[in-house]
Amino acid sequence: MDVGGVGYEVFIPLSSYDHLPPKNEACRILTYHHVREDAQQLFGFMTEDERRMFVMLIGTTGIGPKIALSALSGMSVRELKAAIVQGDVKRLSSISGIGKKVSERLVVELRDKISEGEAFEAVSGRPEMTKEDMKTRDAVMALITLGYRQDEARKMLANALHGDSTEKMTVEDLVKRSLNR
């Protein structure tokens, strides 16, 4: 990011990447300055909820900034809150870099830090994702990782499926099919 002629490296979750404007246009990113003995890093977020969740995550024993960023890339803030409030260790363990013990620690340490209103909103906002929804979401995230924007990745996947069921397909199948179209 260029700020007044000075370039900064800002690490952002995939969820924020889609909201970035085209190159050389103005952008507002909320940042967190992480200082260690050997490095200073900037982490950026498009919403205050993302930044707040990031700070909560890195305040948990065993969670560093890179794993917290991975968590925000793999799940929305709402999904993370719901998993924590409901004690869904299996769902939290699906995040790259987070095992069962760290997932359990997340639930124990963060459950009380999520207000009742936030907890209610997180668990009642939308029905549980089906396996097909999760596969579709993971395929879109894979396409984003390959350099496509989120809206572009969703369109590619929709065009590749043409209404077909994803029930018997793997995430890899969905990505390959999207890239072939």
Image (tube, rainbow, N blue to C red):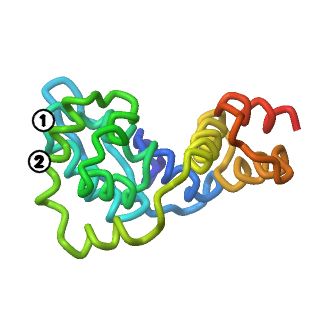
Of helix, strand and loop, which one carries label 2? helix
How many angstroms separate mark 1 from mark 2 (CA)?
9 Å
Q: Left or right of 129: which side holds 151? A: right
Label 1: how many Cα within 10 Å (few below 14, some 14–19, many 20+): few
Vertical arrangement, residue 154 with respect to residue 177, above or below: below
Q: Left or right of 39: which side holds 10? A: right
| Residue kind at label 1, given as amino acid type | Thr
Q: Earlier in the sequence, mark 1 or mark 2?
A: 1
Farthest bottom residue in view? 117
| The one of 155 and 25 positioned closer to us in this rendering | 155
Query: Residue 45: x and y, percent?
Result: 39, 55
| The one of 133 and 181 positioned closer to us in this rendering | 133
| Residue kind at label 2, given as amino acid type | Glu
Residue behind mark 1: 61
Image disc number at residue 109: 2
| The one of 74 and 121 positioned closer to us in this rendering | 121
**Residue at point 45%, 44% (across, down):** 73
Image disc number at residue 35: none
The quarter of the picture where residue 82 lies is bottom left
Q: Are marks 1 and 2 in contact (CB under 8 Å)?
A: yes
Q: Left or right of 75: which side holds 123? A: left
**Residue at point 37%, 42% (across, down):** 91
Quadrant where the C terminus lies?
A: top right
**Residue at point 62%, 46% (across, down):** 132
**Residue at point 50%, 51% (across, down):** 15
- Nearer to us of marks 1 and 2 is 2
